[in-house]
Image (cartoon, grey):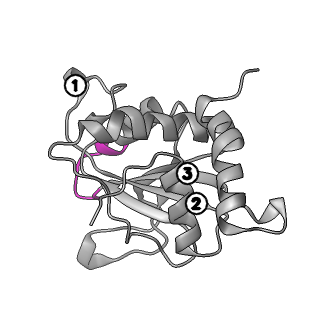
Amino acid sequence: MKKPRLQQHYEEVVRPALLEGRKYTNVHQIPRLEKIVLRMGVPSALEKTAHDDAARDLATITGRKPVTDRARKSVANFKLREGQAIGCHVTLRREVMYEFFDRLVATALPRIRDFRGLSPRAFDGRGNYSMGLDDQTIFPEIDLDKIKRHQGMDVTIVTSAPTDGEALDLLKLMGFPFAEK
């Protein structure tokens, strides 16, 4: 099986550049992508089909069946009952992760209106990057005629980098479009 284009780019270009630039003593210290997690939250006030629509859109975008997230406790102020479906998520690893990352950077993010790059300050302190997307229609896999409601999603890119600076270097070399100051 042929490796994804971005995985080859990481192995042939990014890894040697990080090794040279950061002066790592061991190849296992070089940061890498571990997984990408996509989450869609669905307000409990919407009709019952809203969760099914979100899960279907997430499955279309990723090619994987999403896992349903359920409420752990009942909260009366939010009209939330224990066990009620409140969202869904998909975790991508290995080849599928690289394919999705490639599609996100090359086709989806440039389709955002007035896109000037992503904030380089959205790291969590441990080398993971999180961003929110306002609309699922930026992905070309979504058929606009079948969309009932516009739904946002959270994308978390988990890296093995111990610091945010190392993760920033990794994502920049992978072609992630960060905004320049």
Secondary structure mostly taken by the magenta-highlighted segment of the chain: loop
Q: CA distance from mark 2 to mark 1?
A: 30 Å
Tell me where the magenta segment starts and ends, as one range: 43-51
Q: Which mark is residue 90?
A: none
Residue 15 drawn at (x, y percent): 69, 51
Nearer mark to the viewer, of 2 and 1: 2
- Does dot 1 land on a helix, a strand or a loop? helix
Q: Is residue 180 above or below residue 79?
A: above
| x and y percentages locating residue 167 in the rendered image | 56, 65
Measured Cα–Cα span from mark 3 to mark 1: 25 Å
Give the quarter of the figure containing the N terminus: top right
Which residue does the numbered mark 3 point to in the structure image?
36
Residue 144 numbered mark, or none: 1
Distance from disc 3 to disc 2, alpha carbons, whole Å, reads 6 Å
> Which of the marked residues, 3 or 1, is nearer the chain's N terminus?
3
Instruction: Give the SS element for disc 3.
Output: strand
Which residue bears the numbered disc 2? Answer: 158
